[in-house]
C-alpha cells in the first residue's frame, strides 16, 4: 500500500489544494498511490471529515500535522486531543524533545521532515545543537526538495540509523504523489499508520525518479 | 507562539484603525466586471433587477493605511495574497464604509527564516450598517537573518 505521508490542503495558510481536487487528480492521472495524509502547518484539523471523499474515490485520507521546532519542521502522526493539550501546535519554536516526549506519551510519532533543507530541516541544526534524542524516522524523500536536500537527508539518516519515509509536501494538486511511502500492511486509520511506522514495516519511494 | 507575536496580537488585533467611505459608481463596477470577463447580466446591466458589483470588486478598494500606527517592523513587507468573504450584494450607486482592523498576526518558518504575517481586514458596511463583505489583505514580513 502506497501513501503520500505529507500533503497540505487549503487548511494550511500556504496550501492551494482542496482535498476533493487531490482525489480527482489522483484518479484522473492514475497515480499509483492509495491515499494521502494531510499534514497541515502548525495545527491539527480536527473538524474536517473526509470520510465521504475517501469512500467516493476509494482512497485512504488521514490527518496529521506539521509543527515547527528548533530543529526545523516535524510531522506528527497520531494527533489526539490529549496530545494537543501538551504543546502549542501554533508555535514556531517548539522544543523537539518536548514534541517527541509528548508523542511517545500519547501513542503518536514525530518525524522530522525535509531534514536536509537549510533552516527548516533537522540536519541543518545538528552541528550546532547536537543530534536530538528520540528520533527514529525522518523524511528522506520530499517532493519539494531542491538540489541535494534529499541526498543530505539520506546520507545523514543512514549514518544515524534512521528509517526513512517519503511525502510530496504538496501544496497544489499537481504535486501530490511525487514521493510516498510503501507499507506492507493495509493502512485504514491513523492508528494503523502509527503502528506501521513504529514497527518499521515501510519504505520510502521517490516517484519523481522511480527510486 | 513567539512572545513578540503574542504581544502584537494582544495590542493590535480586532481594533479598528481606519475608516473610509467609498462611492460605488455603476460605470466603474460594470467596467470592472467587463474586464474580469463576467457574462452575468446582474453585473453588467444597470437595469437588471439584481444589479450589483462583482464579488471581487471590493478587493480593489483600499483604506487609508494598511497597518495600524505603531505596528512593529518585523522586516520588509510584501503582498502575500488577498481574500474576500461576501455576505450581501454591494449595490452600485451607493456609498459604503470600510473599517479596517488587523484580523490575524502569525509567524512561520521557511527556507529563508522566520516570516511574520499580518492579515488586514476591511469590513464593508452599507448606509444601514449591514455588513456586506470582508476584504483581507495579507502582508508577509521576512526577517533579516
Image (spheres, coloured by chain):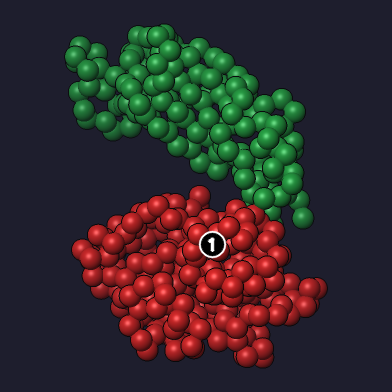
The image position of residue A105, as x and y in percent, is: 59, 73
Q: What residue is at 44 percent from the left and 17 percent from the top? A: B125
In the picture, measured across the screen, residue A127 lies left or right of residue A204, that is right
B37 or A131: which is nearer to us?
A: A131
What residue is shown with label 1?
A82
Above or below: residue A82 compared with residue A125: above
Q: Colour of chain A?
A: red
Q: Which shade is chain B?
A: green
The reply to whether residue A89 is in sight is yes
Query: Where residue B114 appears, x then y in whole percent?
Result: 69, 53
Q: Quadrant of residue A84?
A: bottom right
* Identity of the residue drawn at 55% across and 63% down: A83
Residue B138 relative to residue B34: left or right: right
**What is the chain identity of the residue bearing mark 1?**
A
Q: Compared to A34, does B6 lie above or below?
A: above
Say which quadrant the C terminus of chain B sits in: bottom right
Circle 1 — which element?
A: helix
Q: Nearer the viewer, residue A145 or A115?
A: A115
Q: Position of residue B138 (x, y in %)?
A: 55, 39
Position above or below: A71 against A203:
above
What is the x, y in percent for residue B101? 58, 27
Answer yes or no: is residue A143 visible: no
Question: In percent of the image, x 53 and y 30: which residue is there?
Answer: B121
Q: Residues within 10 Å of mark 1 (few under 14, many from 20)?
A: few
Q: How many marks?
A: 1
Based on the displayed image, in which of its 4 quarters is residue A53 positioned? bottom left
Amino acid at each position: 500500500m502506497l501513501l503520500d505521508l505529507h500533503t497540505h490542503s487549503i487548511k494550511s495558510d500556504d496550501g492551494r489544494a482542496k482535498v476533493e481536487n487531490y482525489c480527482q487528480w489522483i484518479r484522473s492521472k492514475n497515480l499509483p498511490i492509495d491515499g494521502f495524509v494531510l499534514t497541515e502547518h502548525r495545527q491539527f484539523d480536527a473538524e474536517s471529515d473526509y470520510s465521504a471523499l475517501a469512500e467516493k474515490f476509494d482512497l485512504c485520507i488521514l490527518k496529521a500535522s506539521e509543527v515547527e521546532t528548533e530543529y526545523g519542521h516535524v510531522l506528527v502522526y497520531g494527533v489526539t486531543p490529549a496530545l494537543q493539550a501538551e504543546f502549542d501546535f501554533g508555535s514556531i519554536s517548539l522544543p523537539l524533545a518536548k514534541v517527541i516526549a509528548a508523542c511517545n506519551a500519547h501513542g503518536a510519532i514525530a518525524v522530522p521532515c525535509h531534514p536536509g533543507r537549510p533552516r527548516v530541516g533537522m540536519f541543518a541544526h545538528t552541528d550546532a545543537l547536537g543530534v536530538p534524542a528520540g528520533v527514529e524516522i525522518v523524511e528522506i524523500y520530499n517532493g519539494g526538495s531542491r538540489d541535494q536536500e534529499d541526498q543530505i537527508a539520506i546520507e545523514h539518516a543512514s549514518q544515524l540509523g534512521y528509517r526513512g519515509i517519503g511525502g510530496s509536501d504538496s501544496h497544489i494538486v499537481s504535486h501530490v504523489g511525487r514521493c510516498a511511502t510503501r507499507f506492507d500492511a493495509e493502512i485504514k486509520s491513523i492508528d494503523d499508520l502509527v503502528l506501521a511506522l513504529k514497527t518499521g514495516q515501510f519504505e520510502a519511494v521517490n516517484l519523481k525518479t522511480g527510486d | 507562539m513567539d512572545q513578540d507575536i503574542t504581544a502584537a496580537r494582544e495590542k493590535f488585533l480586532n481594533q479598528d484603525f481606519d475608516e473610509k467611505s467609498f462611492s460605488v459608481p455603476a460605470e466603474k463596477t460594470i467596467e470592472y466586471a467587463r474586464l474580469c470577463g463576467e457574462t452575468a447580466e446582474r453585473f453588467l446591466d444597470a437595469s437588471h433587477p439584481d444589479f450589483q458589483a462583482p464579488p471581487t470588486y471590493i478587493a480593489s478598494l483600499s483604506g487609508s493605511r494598511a497597518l495600524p500606527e505603531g505596528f512593529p517592523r518585523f522586516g520588509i513587507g510584501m503582498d502575500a495574497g488577498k481574500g474576500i468573504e461576501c455576505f450581501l450584494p454591494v449595490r452600485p450607486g451607493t456609498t459604503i464604509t470600510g473599517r479596517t482592523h488587523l484580523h490575524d498576526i502569525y509567524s512561520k518558518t521557511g527556507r529563508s527564516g522566520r516570516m511574520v504575517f499580518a492579515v488586514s481586514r476591511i469590513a464593508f458596511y452599507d448606509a444601514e450598517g449591514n455588513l456586506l463583505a470582508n476584504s483581507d489583505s495579507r502582508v508577509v514580513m521576512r526577517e533579516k537573518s
